[in-house]
Amino acid sequence: MNNFMKSGYAFACTIFLLCACETDSISPENENKNQSSITENPEKSSKRARSSASIGIVGSSADVNTSTSGGTVLMGGGPDVDEAIQWMINRSGGGDFVVIRASGTDAYNSYIYGLGSVNSVETLLIDSRVLANDAGVEATIRNAEALFIAGGDQYDYVSYWKDTKVEGAINYLRNSKKVPVGGTSAGCAIQGEAYFDAANGTVYSDEALDDPYNQYMSLQTGNFLDIPYLENTITDTHYNDPDRRGRHLTFLARMNEDWGVNAKGIGVDEETAVCIDASGKASVFGYGYAFFLRQNGLGPERCEPNRSLDWYRGRQAVKVYRVRGNSSGSNYLWLTNWTSGAGGSWQYFYADRGRFRFSN
């Protein structure tokens, strides 16, 4: 993958933690959960055809219709957060849970199936625009009661899925059918209205701060997924490894400079998830932190090609609510106003002539 072609960065042999590449972490103990607890109701269900993108299914092959509650999961990559998946299962009404990806295996099937009561879990490998426009693939997604976008390379998702039936089906699920939709790593990175597409590979914080318009800083907005409460918002993942605060701050600077918006962002540590319910309450689960960024008044003093970013504004350029996750998700921020929350603390991010800084 082109993320790893850049010089100066060696890689470990175990796991890649770049924005554009995420290896799903499935706990071995979840692979052999009992899969006999869900049965179909022949009076209310019908057999559903497997699409050409399906690489595996567990549970019932009968279609069901359940009462669902909409929501969004932004997972930061690394080991998956069981409580966030269970949060989605609870809102699915025990229906059909679909996982979509452009590379990888069906390992999520048994993992998700073992975390709660669902009718089935099915994985679709959608690695071409032909498959992304396949009527059977579209039908499988639209019939889901929960959808999870696995990690991988977000540029695959952009190049394969944008402006296709898959894009329409995802937006239909979240906005019309109102089911829970989530994703981890690359599957989280594409959910904001604005997004870093990684078209030219990943970008590191020092590179972004040194030149906000360098070749790797490829951003798009308003042309892919339409997720409630993420308007004018860009997400970032693997926030703590490597430190991505500097590049996330630069993403917001570019959003303001290029599109004139009051930019916002949600950054999520590994093994951490932000779960946003239908009322806009963003609860944080897991073991790390979530960071809610909001432009604090004026845009950057300097954001231009071949010059370092300067967004000082009295050391208060971007206001940040830092929230620690836990197993109950008791710490939160309301995305209806981005000011009311519990269990977190406020700080500021700013850039001083190309160097990331923060203050309390």
Image (cartoon, helix red, strand yellow):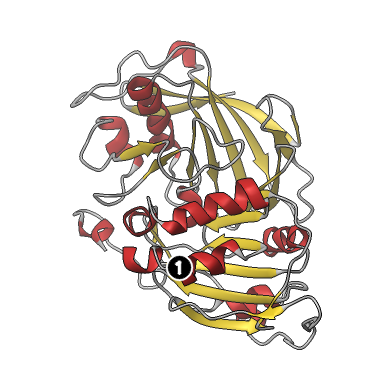
Relative image position of residue 299 (x, y in whole percent)? 41, 16
Q: Amino acid at mark 1?
A: Ala
Relative image position of residue 5 (x, y in whole percent)? 20, 59
The answer to whether residue 185 shows anywhere in this view is no
Q: Nearer the viewer, residue 120 or 239?
A: 120
Q: Residue at x 72, y 76 (%)?
A: 119
Q: Nearer the viewer, residue 357 or 135?
A: 135
Figure check: 292 above or below 147: above
Q: Residue at x 55, y 57 (%)?
A: 183
Q: Residue at x 35, y 38 (%)?
A: 220
Relative image position of residue 294 (x, y in whole percent)? 55, 25
Q: Which residue is mark 1?
A: 135
Quarter the C terminus occupies: top right
Instruction: Locate residue 196: give its quadrant.
Output: top left
The answer to whether residue 18 shows anywhere in this view is yes
Quarter the N terminus occupies: bottom left
What is the crowding at mark 1: few (fewer than 14 residues within 10 Å), some, or many (at least 20)?
few
Q: Nearer the viewer, residue 280 or 316?
A: 280
